[in-house]
Image: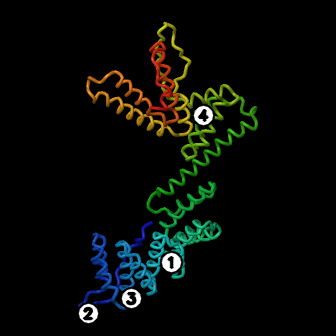
Amino acid sequence: MTATVGGPAHGAGEEPGGETAGDLCDQARDLANGGHLKRAARLYEKAARHDGGAGQARALFGLAVVRFDLGDVEGAREADTRAIETGHREYAPRAAHHLALCREETEDPEGARVAWRTVLELGNERYLAAAHHGLARLAESEGDLAEAARHWEGVERHADADPDTAVTAAADHGRRLLARGDTEGAARQVKRGRAQETQGRDASLGLVSAAVHLERAIVELGGVLDDEERDPEATRLQAPEDRAAIVELLARLLALRGDPGAAREVWTRGVEHRDVELAAGVQDRLRRGFLTPELAAPDDGTEPDAAAEPWWDGYVAAAVADDSLPLLTGELFLALTQMHAHLGSVHAAGSATPVDALWAAVLSGLRVPSDYAWGASLHADFADRLSQASGGHAVLPENWPDEP
C-alpha cells in the first residue's frame, strides 16, 4: 500500500516578494512528479514557514510525502504531525491518513492505529471509510473479529463519500471471509462493492466474485457425490458419463482452488468406485490425452502385449490427480538435459574414446533420475530392456544405480 495520499491543492499566504505558499507548493508538486524529490522538499520547507492557513498545512503534508519517498521516515512523521496540528479541514486528515499508511509500511501497527483514530476524530467524511478500513485490517491481523466487524460496518456507513475505498475494502473483506469459509458473506461484499464502482469493474472485486462462484460450484458438485454415497439407489439410474464428469469437474476445481490433496482424494474415490462403469468413466477422464506408445513386436515373433501399460503411466496419472504435471514435466526435462550432458562428455573426449568409457558415461547418465520418485521405475525398465536386448549377457554393476 502506497503512503502517497492524494495531491496537494492550492493554498494561501505570501512571501515578502509576492510568491505565495500555494505557488511554492505548485512548483514543489511539479518537481516531485518529475522525480526531483530533494528540490521539491526544499520548496515545501520554504512554503511551510508561512504562518497558518491552507498554504502551510498543504506544504507540511506535501513535505511529509516527499520525505517518506526519500526514505526519511522520521522527517515524514514529523511533517505529518505538524500538518495534523494545524487542524486544517482537508490537510490535517490527509496527513493523518498518510501517517497511518507510513506506520503500516514500517510495521508499526500501534502507531498506525493511533493515526487512523486521529483521522476519525478529525471528522472529514471523505477519509472516514479509509480510516475504518485501516482499523479493520489491524483488528483482523490481531484476530479480533468483533472489533474488525465494527470497522467493516464503518466502511459501509461512509461508502458513498469514498466509493473507491469502499470497493477496495469490499474486495479485501470478501477475501478474508472466503479464507474463513464464509462464501455467502463474501458474496454480499461483492454485491456491495459492485454498487460503489464508478470506473468500470474492479479487478480485485472480480477475483473475489469468481472465487465465490468457484466455492459454490465445489459445494454443489460435492453435494451430488455425497448424496450418492448416502443413497446409491437414488443415483443408480443417472447417466454414468454425467457422474464421471462431476467427479472430474470437482477434482479440477479443488485443484484450481489450491487444494491438491482434496483433488487427489476425489479422483481416487472415482477410479475405485464400486460402480464399475462409473469407475471406468472416471479412469478415462483421468487418463485423457495420455501417450499410448506403439509397442514393437518381441524378437520371438509373438504379438506385443497391447494391454500392458507403460511404466510411467502411474506417475502421470498421479500428477494429473495432484495437479502437479508442470513439476513432473520439469523433472523430466531436467533429467534429460543432465543425461545428455553426461553422454556428450564422451563425444567431447574424441573418437578414440574406448568402449568402456562410453559404457561408464551411459551408466552415469542413467543415474541422473535416482532422486526422483519415478527414477527407480526408469532404472528397472532399463535393466529389463538391457537384459532382453543382450539375451541376458549384459550385466549391470552390483548395487547399480545406488553406487558409482
Residue 194 drawn at (x, y percent): 52, 59
- Amino acid of disc 4: Ala
Q: CA distance from mark 4 to mark 3?
A: 70 Å
Residue 331 drawn at (x, y percent): 45, 37
In which quadrant of the rendered image does the C terminus lie? Answer: top left
In which quadrant of the rendered image does the N terminus lie? Answer: bottom left
- What colour scheme has been applied to the protein in the rendered image? rainbow
Q: Earlier in the sequence, mark 3 or mark 1?
A: 3
Q: Is residue 284 left or right of residue 85?
A: right
Residue 268 drawn at (x, y percent): 63, 35
Q: For the residues carrying marks 3 and 1, which lies nearer the camera in this image?
A: 1
Q: Is residue 336 left or right of residue 135?
A: left
Secondary structure type for disc 2: loop
The front one of 188 and 63 is 63
Residue underneath mark 3: 53
The front one of 145 and 241 is 145
Reply above or below: 22 against 374: below
Q: Residue at x 37, y 34 (%)?
A: 337
Q: Are marks 4 and 3 in contact (CB under 8 Å)?
A: no
Q: Earlier in the sequence, mark 2 or mark 4?
A: 2
Q: Earlier in the sequence, mark 1 or mark 4?
A: 1
Q: For the residues carrying marks 1 and 4, which lies nearer the camera in this image?
A: 1
- Amino acid of disc 2: Pro
Q: For the residues carrying marks 2 and 1, which lies nearer the camera in this image?
A: 1
Residue underneath mark 1: 115
Residue underneath mark 4: 245
Secondary structure type for disc 1: helix
Residue underneath mark 2: 16
